Amino acid sequence: MTVAVTVAMAVAATIVMTVAATAVISVAMTVAAEVAAASRRPPAVGPVDRGAGSPL
């Protein structure tokens, strides 16, 4: 394997890993933001809280 092929493979692997890491971080931050928003949201009360089959 020539030096050029080795360098090209290293560059490609670096790009792929960077894109994958960015996607994972993006998903993690989105989930964290949703969890934070849900924890700040007041609990639902009244008719909104009851399902269609609820005996209440």
Image: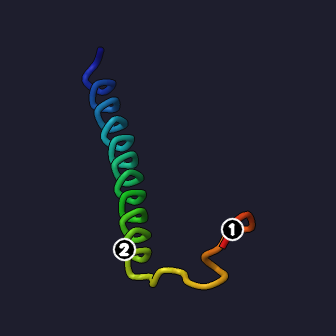
Residue toward you, 51 or 8: 51
Quarter of the image for residue 29 reads: bottom left
Q: Is residue 52 above or below residue 12?
A: below
Front position in the image: 2 or 16: 16
- Is disc 2 placed on a helix, strand or loop? helix
Name the kind of residue labelled 1 in the image. Pro
Most distant residue in the right direction: 52
In the rendered view, tell whether residue 22 sits above or below residue 37. Answer: above
Q: Quadrant of residue 37?
A: bottom left
In terms of secondary structure, where does tag 1 sit?
A: loop
Mark earlier in primary sequence (1, 2): 2
Q: Nearer the viewer, residue 46 or 32?
A: 46
Residue 43 placed where, x, y %? 48, 80
Residue at image point 64% right, 80% down: 48
Spatial CA distance of label 1 from label 2 is 31 Å
Question: In screen coordinates, is 45 left or right of 54?
Answer: left
Residue in view at x 74 percent, y 67 percent: 52
- The residue where tag 1 is placed is 55
Whole-percent x, y for residue 3 in the image: 25, 23
Say how the picture is coloured. rainbow
Residue at the extreme front of the image, as rendered: 55
Name the residue: 36% across, 65% down.
Answer: 32
Quadrant occupied by the C terminus: bottom right
Which residue in the protein does label 2 denote?
36
Residue type at the position of mark 2: Ala
Q: Quadrant of the N terminus?
A: top left
Mark 1 closeness class: few <14, some 14–19, many ≥20 residues within 10 Å:
few
State which quadrant residue 35 falls in: bottom left
Q: Which mark is residue 28?
A: none
Disc 1 versus disc 2: nearer the observer: 1
